[in-house]
Image: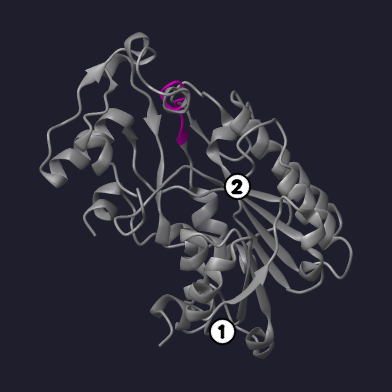
Amino acid sequence: MFPDWLILPSNLNPLGALPARFRRQRVLIVGCGDVGMRAAQLLRQRVRVLALTSNSERVPALRAAGIVPLLGDLDRPGTLARVAGLASRVIHLAPPPGEGMADPRTQALTRVLLRRELPLSMVYGSTSGVYGDCGGEWLNETRAVNPQTPRAWRRVDAELHMRSLGRRGVRASILRIPGIYAPDREGGTPRERLLKATPVLVAEEDVFTNHIHADDLARACVLALWHGRPQRVVNVSDDSDLKMGDYMDLAADLYQLPRPPRTTLAQAAETLSAMRLSFMRESRRLDNQRMKRELRLRLAYPTVHQGLID
């Protein structure tokens, strides 16, 4: 059976009217991890879903999920030749490398796609971290990027490669994604951090944080393939309006665990990792109206309270 949200009449269906040729289309997922698999499950009964993987051990699991596996490694561009001209639509969720200021993986993918007929549309999963610290302000997609970590700079570089495809005629959508969570996702809830008593900031130094349930993100990726506007950035975030400490307190109460200890940023700098500290130094609130208006996404989990207890 198709998911209800995918088979509603065309005037209600968030994917809109599905033409007959839809059944013959191919969708390629690059970076078919947790979110990619969720997107594939939404798509696979209506289109042929292919997934690029560098790990041959994943081939049986992909096939079992009804996905056609393609072996190729974004770190070895010479292995990507089969990808060129293969699919009419592409979802790119592969992360950049862990070092440097650029994303050679997205550059390699872009170059191979340019060799043959380009896809009609492409969706790239970026990060809201490209905005940097916004002092807790609400912001929409017109806000200029202000990356403050190498990790964010790598994403900005990847976005530029997506825009280059857009200039060649691909309907490229850039989804700026905050923290992804889901109870059935590995590490997808704060439970482990709560069990370790990882500290959060004192209220006067705390930062606003943003979230999206993995199922809602997968829906956004699928919807953007058909509804995304050319060269368009979309914030993909739920309706929660919480500081990080309040989010952790909420999770602790839901899971009946002790609330995390509070600390100052100066104290946290002595014990926490650089990555964890980077999240504690950036505060922003994402406006998601473009997501709702243009992608027509109806959030299944509008707030983390609903998503964490699902």
Q: Residues within 10 Å of mark 1 (few under 14, many from 20)?
A: some
Q: Nearer the viewer, residue 8 or 170?
A: 170
Query: Which residue type does callout 2 highlight?
Result: Pro
Give me the residue at 34% from left, 43% from top.
240
Q: Residues within 10 Å of mark 2 (few under 14, many from 20)?
A: some
Give me the residue at 65% from left, 39% from top.
155
First to last magenta residue range: 279-285
Q: Position of residue 61 (x, y in %)?
A: 48, 73
Q: Position of residue 39 (x, y in %)?
A: 51, 67
Q: Secondary structure at mark 1?
A: loop
Q: Which disc, if any, is residue 67?
A: none
Give me the residue at 69% from left, 61% from top.
122
Q: Quadrant of residue 87?
A: bottom right
Asked if the magenta segment contains residue 283, the reply would be yes
Q: Nearer the viewer, residue 42 or 69?
A: 69
Query: Which residue type does callout 1 highlight?
Result: Arg
Asked if the magenta segment contains residue 149, the reply would be no
> Taking 211 as reference, is 29 above or below it?
below
Residue receiving disc 2: 95
- Could you tell me if residue 133 is visible in this image? yes
Q: Nearer the viewer, residue 245 or 298?
A: 245
Q: Quadrant of residue 140?
A: top right
- Could you tell me if residue 166 is visible in this image? no
Residue receiving disc 1: 46
